[in-house]
Amino acid sequence: MAEAAEPPPLDLVVVAGPTASGKTPLALYLAERLGSEIVNFDSMQMFRGFDLGTAKPTSAELARVPHHFIGEFAPEEDMTAGEYARRARPRLAEIAARGRLPVLVGGSGFYLRALLEGLSPLPAASPELRRRLRRRSPERLHRLLVRLDAEAARRIAVRDAPKAIRALEVRCLTGRGLAAAWREHPRQPLPAVRALKLGLAPPRAALYERINRRAAAMFAGGIQEETRRLLARYPAGLKLFAAHGYKQACDLLLRGAELPAALAEAQQEQRNYAKRQFTWFRRDAEIHWLAGFGDEPALQAAALEYARLRPAGD
């Protein structure tokens, strides 16, 4: 009996970079000219209803090309990088089968790595353990992580409760730290995929100024009202309410915070997040860096030329 033929490579383009760097306009520009469908790998934009604080594409932008993993999941769903990879890999195959080029866009580097390179086959999420851990503040979770898995604690930000919970979960279920568990179990990379990775690297000062302006626009444009509507539907302990912007909106609505202090904290958190994103993506030697913002016409033209002239994987 003849062996089954190997599936053809799934060529794809990745648009990565820090928050507020213009990934959405660049991805749209490329997708419209390359005959593409956009696949989101921003971990926050996947959830329904959380729109302003996650800087989701507008309805007009979503209508320009097909999008995937934008607002597809209920906020109560426990989405992890591994679960995202399991759901997104078949979607990439479907896009390729239609003769379209997937354009992956987002700022959650761990989700991108899970999708393209795979993760170690670590234990599945434990709902009961996660419920217990979520009763603790991000700071308490991080202190516990320092005691149980110091190596993971050095890599995870103090306020990044979802990652801290996953690291603690792995430690409790396997008796090993997260890094040790990864080393013991090889990854399962997506086979036969050639990816052209483009990264946005605008000047740091200009990026921080744009982050500050975008946060100010969010708080002037209705994130408090969006959060009020969401709090009427979901418990205040929902992990999404601890995300940048929503935490400060909750502080205003539930804890009597003053707007100037809440806005300043949101701006600082987003600038810190951008620093972490730069650090993460700079580790990827395959990324071709573009010096500027993704909405700059000259940069968009250069990115398109690069995508057309360079074979994926070069």
Image: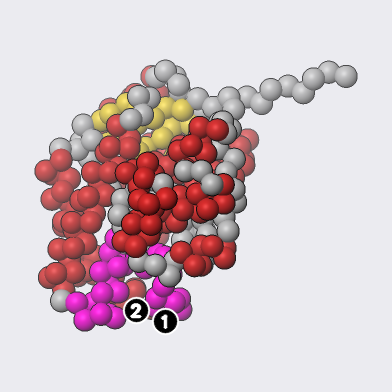
Q: Residue at x 33, y 35 (%)?
A: 281
Q: Residue 231 lies in what quarter of the image?
A: bottom left
Q: Is mark 2 on a helix, strand or loop?
A: helix
Image location of residue 105, percent across then percent down: 40, 42
- Can you tell which quarter of the image residue 291 is in? top left
Q: Is residue 138 left or right of residue 46?
A: left
How crowded pointer 2 is (Cα within 10 Å; few <14, some 14-19, many 20+) is rated as some
| Mark carried by residue 228 | 2
Q: Nearer the viewer, residue 13 or 74?
A: 74
Q: Name the residue under label 1.
A: 232
Locate the N terminus and report the quarter of the image it occupies.
Answer: top right
Which residue is found at the position 43% from the left and 70% from the top? 135
Tags 1 and 2 in contact by the CB under 8 Å rule? yes
Query: On screen, 304 above or below 49?
Result: above
- Whether residue 13 is visible, yes or no, is yes
The reply to whether the magenta stretch includes residue 214 is no
Q: Label 1: state its secondary structure.
A: loop
* Residue 137 point in image, percent of width and height: 35, 66
Q: Nearer the viewer, residue 120 or 36?
A: 120
Q: Distance between the residues labelled 1 and 2?
A: 6 Å
Query: Which region is colored magenta?
Result: 231-257
| Residue at point 57%, 63% (across, down) | 127
Q: Residue at x 51, y 62 (%)?
A: 130
User: Percent from the top left, x then y, of residue 72?
Assistant: 52, 59
Q: Is residue 249 magenta?
A: yes
| Colour pattern | secondary structure
The residue closer to the viewer here, 235 or 147, is 147
Which amino acid type is shown beneath numbered disc 2?
A: Arg
- Residue type beneath disc 1: Ala
